[in-house]
DNA sequence: GCCCTCCTTGCAAACGTATGCATAAAGTTA
DNA sequence: TAACTTTATGCATACGTTTGCAAGGAGGGC
């Protein structure tokens, strides 16, 4: 057992050379009759080409490394599933690397990745130090950042139009009569978080309003919840909270409701991402949609054309998504 | 670019043979001074061993194939994260294969898996036809079923003690005064679903009660929701519903609340899994905990000892978890 | 000082495939 | 039919490692 059949054994059975077998299975030219003999013998022996051996010689492993940090945020499993399905359809597969919250362990992870000779890397919500970036570039391995830009890194990135989305969300709050608007930001170490905060600030300034508060929620449920409690405890309270992502927004809603407040009567809440859970009645969260499908498509297109040798200059792709009005914020008048 | 440094280049720089370099990096014996020279040269060149080449010769790829179907059920991302972290710590990595809901495409997926020369396979909530099982056995690749048993398959499996857990949940409902208890089952094509149903029926029979209804929810949100609506629409309604997993239970709660009923005043709801979301205040779901940690540990222990050549007879491991009492069911009297 | 053992090291052969090169066969054109 | 082009095939090498084998050197016991 454990001895898989090789192309040589197939060759012998089919009465041809090992090269012939290889050519049949790698799509190179071969006469119809040889192909037939080879396929018959292969089926008989249950032969399938060894991907690793093939990878050694071609230099293409057909493995894509995926680095992912926040698997508890529903956005990422969904993205993972779509990435995986799309890649599988193209004959690639995902080698997954989960990275602990601490950023320092990422170095080891990237090195591990390179050891596997991956054809490309998708970094979801993860920042790469310039040293690591160099490592990948030097190894000739394309990297695409998913849902997290990194200016000056020279890497391609695919995100939603975070500034614009946050602006839309904030404007919607302003237009529905809110004036004491707080923002629980995403982690300020991430461009995505900073951009959403930027959009918030722009919209506020544009309306001549001062933010009620801006506090870093670290993309963390507990942090966000305790910030929400703090915000709702003072003598003057916000009448709306724009939260840096849905994952935190759920915690905020939970906390606020537990304090006895009503959403949106006492305070409106808007999130960002539109994860499936946002549409579930228990939360019914107004939020800015990140179009996962199109983000995934753009990511793969960028990555795969890099892999296929087309010189792709680092591009920063931003995809716009609509504001999805739901029950956690006051409805727009007249609509 | 793209030209990674090889052990041969390191050898030349260090003034030793290529074998020496290999031995240093594969942990074989080498004198301290050689090791030092090699490491220095390696660091200077940025050398790291090529895992694929190593895999070719050793026959060990240090890749574990993971087949997973329901990534929208929060239980699986969580399990995935823990599996990945634990495996990373042991020098393994996960090649992920998402499988569409249709069961027929699994064949192709398993073949793809074997092509990558994976050292082992974890099938999460997926059934393998006997043909596929044979394929893996013949290839000498150990398979462990995670959260889904498959009697007679000859494969090891790790699940929670589903019959017992379901019995506990049902008993809790009975003890708190419910008598018209319905069960929205997991997919009847899965042993996990059948076992939980079994536990439900046992407990009911034991108490001399007749199930109010037993309907297959297919592990699907929409299906579960429409069943819930149907159950709550008749003139006699259940006073409790035991749902086959949390994922469906959330849909059931959403639907019931939207109909204007109150939980647990009008109807108690109990789920199964204890995913993180179950403890969030919006649902506060009473549920049977599946101890993910211990299930992951057991899975890896079984899998890795198989991989390391220890003859492991197929084992069926069931891990017990407690009932977690929360607000979606009436509290036990006196507690 | 001799023999034996142990540790270290280099040589060379694998692992299973893809592919350049040369040759043979087949087809095309005049 | 001859010359030339295209297509098919086998041989041999290469990919980057691990590892059995043999040889060399160091050290210990007598």
Image (tube, coloured by chain):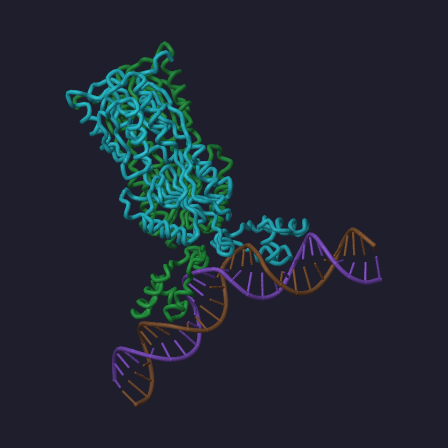
Chain colours: A green, B cyan, C purple, D brown
Whether residue A332 sits left or right of residue B40 in the image: it is: left
Residue B212 seen in the current view: yes
Instruction: Say which quarter of the image contains residue A6.
Output: bottom left
Between B323 and A38, the one lying in front of the other is: B323
Whether residue B212 sits left or right of residue A12 in the image: it is: left
Compared to C18, does B273 lie above or below? Answer: above
Q: Residue drawn 44% across and 36% down?
A: B296
Compared to A191, does A335 lie above or below? Answer: above
Q: What is the x, y in percent for residue B274?
A: 37, 27
Residue A198 seen in the current view: no
Between A268 and A60, the one lying in front of the other is: A60
Q: What is the x, y in percent for residue B260?
A: 20, 19
Q: What is the x, y in percent for residue A125?
A: 40, 36
In the picture as drawn, the residue positioned furthest to the top comes out as A235
Give the quadrant of the N terminus of chain A. Answer: bottom left
Whether residue B270 sits left or right of residue D11 in the image: it is: left
Instruction: Say which quarter of the image contains residue A280.
Output: top left
Compared to B213, does B97 lie above or below? Answer: below
Instruction: Say which quarter of the image contains residue B244.
Output: top left
Between B247 and A204, the one lying in front of the other is: B247
**How many discs appear?**
0
Q: What is the x, y in percent for residue B49?
A: 53, 51
In the picture as drawn, the residue positioned furthest to the left comes out as B235
Give the quadrant of the C terminus of chain A. Answer: top left
């Amino acid at each position: 057992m454990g001895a898989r059949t090789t192309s040589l054994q197939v060759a012998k059975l089919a009465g041809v050379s090992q090269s012939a077998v290889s050519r049949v299975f790698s799509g190179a030219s071969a006469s119809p009759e040889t192909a037939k003999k080879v396929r018959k013998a292969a089926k008989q022996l249950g032969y399938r080409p060894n991907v690793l051996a093939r990878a050694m010689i071609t230099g293409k492993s057909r493995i894509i490394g995926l680095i992912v940090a926040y698997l508890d945020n529903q956005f990422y499993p969904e993205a993972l599933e779509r990435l995986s399905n799309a890649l599988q359809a193209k004959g690639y597969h995902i080698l997954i690397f989960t990275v602990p919250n601490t950023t320092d362990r990422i170095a080891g992870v990237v090195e591990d990745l390179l050891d596997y000779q991956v054809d490309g890397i998708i970094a979801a919500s993860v920042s790469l130090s310039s040293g690591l970036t160099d490592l990948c570039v030097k190894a000739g391995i394309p990297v695409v950042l998913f849902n997290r830009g990194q200016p000056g890194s020279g890497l391609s990135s695919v995100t939603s139009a975070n500034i614009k989305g946050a602006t839309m969300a904030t404007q919607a709050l302003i237009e529905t009569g809110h004036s004491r608007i707080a923002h629980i930001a995403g982690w300020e170490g991430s461009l995505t978080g900073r951009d959403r905060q930027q959009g918030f600030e722009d919209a506020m300034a544009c309306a001549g309003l001062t933010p009620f508060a801006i506090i870093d929620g670290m993309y963390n449920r507990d942090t966000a919840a305790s910030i929400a409690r703090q915000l709702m405890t003072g003598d003057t309270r916000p009448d709306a909270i724009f939260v840096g992502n849905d994952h935190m927004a759920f915690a905020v809603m939970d906390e606020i409701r537990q304090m006895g407040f009503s959403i949106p009567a006492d305070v409106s809440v808007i999130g960002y991402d539109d994860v499936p859970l946002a549409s579930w009645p228990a939360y019914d969260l107004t939020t800015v949609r990140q179009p996962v499908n199109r983000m995934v498509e753009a990511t793969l297109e960028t990555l795969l054309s890099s892999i296929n040798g087309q010189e792709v200059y680092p591009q920063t792709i931003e995809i716009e998504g609509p504001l999805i009005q739901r029950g956690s914020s006051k409805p727009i008048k007249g609509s």
